[in-house]
Amino acid sequence: MNMDKVISLALEEDCAYDDVTSKNIITKDIKATAVLVAKDNGVLCGLEIFKKVFLKLNKDFKFKVFIKDAQTVKKGDVILTMQGSASSLLSGERTALNFIQKLSGIATTTNVFVNVIKGSKTKIYDTRKTIPGFRNISKYAVRCGGAQNHRMNLSDMVLIKDNHLALIDDLSLKVKEIRKKHKKLLIQIECENQKNVQDAIEAKADFIMLDNMGKDLLKKMIKLIRKSSTKSYKPAIEISGGIDFKTIKEYAKLGIERISIGMLTHSAPSLDMSLEVKVQK
């Protein structure tokens, strides 16, 4: 979704153009300055969106930026200063903070995972478990945190999941048919048991996802996939399901290429910040 549309919807949701409090207290000619301050340590994300919220309300806002997206912030750091219409500043404050706090939270959580397995061959990926309409900016936040994006949408990659498998009689044949129609698309197959894995290998999937498997079965399936690999066919292995800060390092030691984590976008806590406003009389 276009970012301007997302911002407009957010401002409309908050009735920012009909802020009865600010309209009845502050006249249009009053100016204000504000300082955006980090209240916790983390990774910054969403600065341009933060600015665009205010510029949508009043094009005359001016900003001075000290820390950029994907850079780390510490508690007490001044991220930016701004000045402009006091009424517009107060009307857009919550919407702007909601964006930058949530996106910085995603980037921060992602960065923790990335740092835990730093030095391994495994790369961390997000999922499509995002707030509807917030897909692009959520995945941007994941990149700011140092991880990779899985497919952006349903047209980016063929991902055959358990519900698809239940409707397929011959997986190898179906994969061949798909490749004829979509020569440039990669194919991933989600596997929950050994039969799924064997079928995925026979179908020559580009990626084999081992989903929610116990550790013993997981190790066994990794060995099976590696043993079945050849010079011309070596599928990448992805692990997904039930991975957290405590377990990810152990999974990365298995030598798999990819780990996908839904909580990066659906459960990351917001990074605390405050916008300290001072009205110029």
Image (spheres, rainbow, N blue to C red):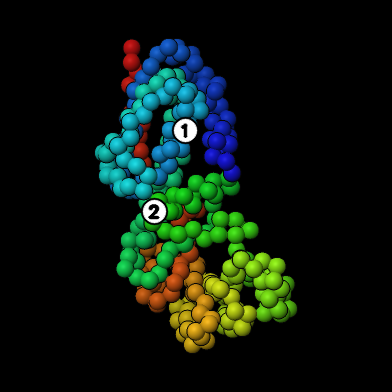
Residue 195 in view in this figure: no
Q: Position of residue 247 (x, y in %)?
A: 38, 69
Other residues around mark 1 within 10 Å, as few (<14) / some (14–19) / many (≥20): some
Specify the quadrant of the image occupied by residue 8. Answer: top right
Specify the quadrant of the image occupied by residue 98. Answer: top left
Q: Indicate the quadrant containing the N terminus: top left, top right, bottom left or bottom right.
A: top right
Element marked by disc 2: loop
Residue 97 in view in this figure: yes
Q: Position of residue 259 (x, y in %)?
A: 45, 67
272 vs 227, nearest the viewer: 227
Alpha carbon of mark 1 to alpha carbon of mark 2: how far? 22 Å
Residue 163 to residue 143: above or below: below
Q: Position of residue 244 (x, y in %)?
A: 41, 64
Residue beneath the point at 54% across and 39% down: 3
Q: Is residue 27 left or right of residue 131?
A: left
Element marked by disc 1: helix
Q: Is residue 133 left or right of residue 120?
A: right
Q: Earlier in the sequence, mark 1 or mark 2?
A: 1
On the image, numbered disc 2 is attached to which residue? 145
Residue beneath the point at 46% across and 37% down: 49
Going by the numbered disc 2, the residue's amino acid type is: Gly
Other residues around mark 2 within 10 Å, as few (<14) / some (14–19) / many (≥20): many
Going by the numbered disc 1, the residue's amino acid type is: Lys
On the image, numbered disc 1 is attached to which residue? 52
Residue beneath the point at 48% across and 71% down: 239
Residue beneath the point at 66% across and 66% down: 182
Q: Which mark is residue 1?
A: none
Tell which residue pokes out farthest to the bottom in this image. 227
Q: Position of residue 258 (x, y in %)?
A: 46, 69
89 vs 68, nearest the viewer: 68
